[in-house]
Amino acid sequence: MTETIIKLDQLEKCFDSHEVLRSISAEVRTGDVIGLLGLNGAGKTTLLETALGFAVPDSGSTSLFGRPASAIADERIKHRIGFVPQQDELIETMKGSEFLGLIGRFYSSWNSDLIGRLARDWDVPLGKPAMKLSVGQRQKLSILAALGHEPELIVLDEPVASLDPLARRIFLQELIGMVSSGERTIVFSTHIVSDLERIANRVWVLKDGRLVVDEALDNLKESGVKVAQAGGSRFPASSGVTAGMSLEEIFLELHK
Amino acid sequence: MFTLNPHSGIPIYRQIIEQVRWMTASDQLRPGDALPSVREIAVDHAVNAMTVSKAYSLLEAEGILVRQRGKPMTVSADLGRKESKTARLKRLAELIGPLVMAARQLQLDNDDVLAAVSKALENEND
């Protein structure tokens, strides 16, 4: 059954008189895998944090599973969401296994078998304290901590920035497996466009505070020109986006 | 089973459809052969399962694949049957669209285009 998981309605957010989010409206439905693209500093993290209720918008609203995002503290909503922040929040002196044990205590649905399997598949040494892990291992541990309670909605902020291509591929395959039944939803921000092209079904591009692209990936590839010319499109008419472009080319074209 | 390029301008589901068509046309896939599940292909190739599912559904609609309860998608036994003229014209229409667009961009008038197509058809019939 498809429901609206996240609904953003005219979100506005300013930091120091800089408009980071300008009237952002969008929806995420069950089974979507949304790839959020944008230059560094475009506001992707702000968008994700605001969408989840971790930050309060200046105006506009966000809802999660039909409830206002301000209700994020509500256990029933929180347990349905897994968030991987850009800066990990590992406890430096704690061993991975202990850290996961700590996180697991907050959730009644914690699946330690799943976490054990993933830790093995992803090569994450759980016997070492966080401060002895490499950047890639820290990132993977951080992801594990967000997946243990098998959330319906997984939000990841630059989840693979520190992973090598092999690790990224293994991670993507896992994510793909997780959403293949269509009952889970993922939103992830990245600047690794090629990963997005594999796993996302829908693309958001955040530029100058606005979602200049909110489109199914297949549509972007098939009808780039049509999108630019149709009245309701969000592509500026002057953009050089045509059909048959790779996502990276589309992204670069939009930023010329 | 497939060679998929997520970075090409061609959506993945379209690539899968094309490749299944080629494989059935060249007997690499025969009537009755089973295809891997959506999930298997999605995970192996690290692509979104919905795009694989879309390809399978469209191939089913085309009559190339057959879906049976509890069984994997299989290649249809009816492949040999010729499609109706309407269906075949519809396939051609997909190629006519880009041709017309190119003609416009090259600022060629209708008569030039029709003459070019006629010539190509004649050459083909020789």
Image (cartoon, coloured by chain):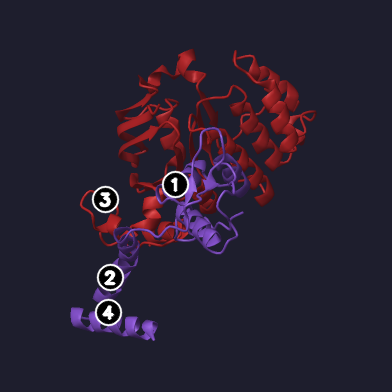
Quarter of the image that includes the N terminus of chain B: bottom right
Q: Earlier in the sequence, mark 1 or mark 2?
A: 1
- Which chain contains the residue that carries disc 1? B
Q: CA distance from mark 4 to mark 3?
A: 26 Å
Residue contact at pointers 1 and 2, CB within 8 angstroms: no
Amino acid type, label 2: Met
Residue A54 visible in the current orientation: yes
Percent x, y of residue A165:
65, 51
Earlier residue among tags 2 and 4: 2
Q: Which residue is mark 4?
A: B106
Q: From the top left corner, tell me how far across and down residue A184 is, in percent.
A: 50, 30
Local crowd at mark 4 within 10 Å, few (<14), some, or many (≥20)? Answer: few
Front in this rendered view, residue B63 or B19: B63
Q: Nearer the viewer, mark 1 or mark 2?
A: 1
Palette colour of chain A = red
In the drawing, does residue B82 fall left or right of residue A139? left
State the mark number for residue B60.
1
Q: Are marks 2 and 3 on the same chain?
A: no
Which chain is purple in the rendering?
B
Q: Quadrant of residue A145?
A: top right
> Same chain, marks 4 and 3?
no
Q: Classify B92 as above or below B58.
A: below
In this picture, residue A210 sits left or right of residue A161: left
Q: Residue at x 33, y 66 (%)?
A: B92
What whole-number distance in Å separates the C-alpha atoms at marks 4 and 1? 38 Å
Amino acid residing under circle 3: Ser
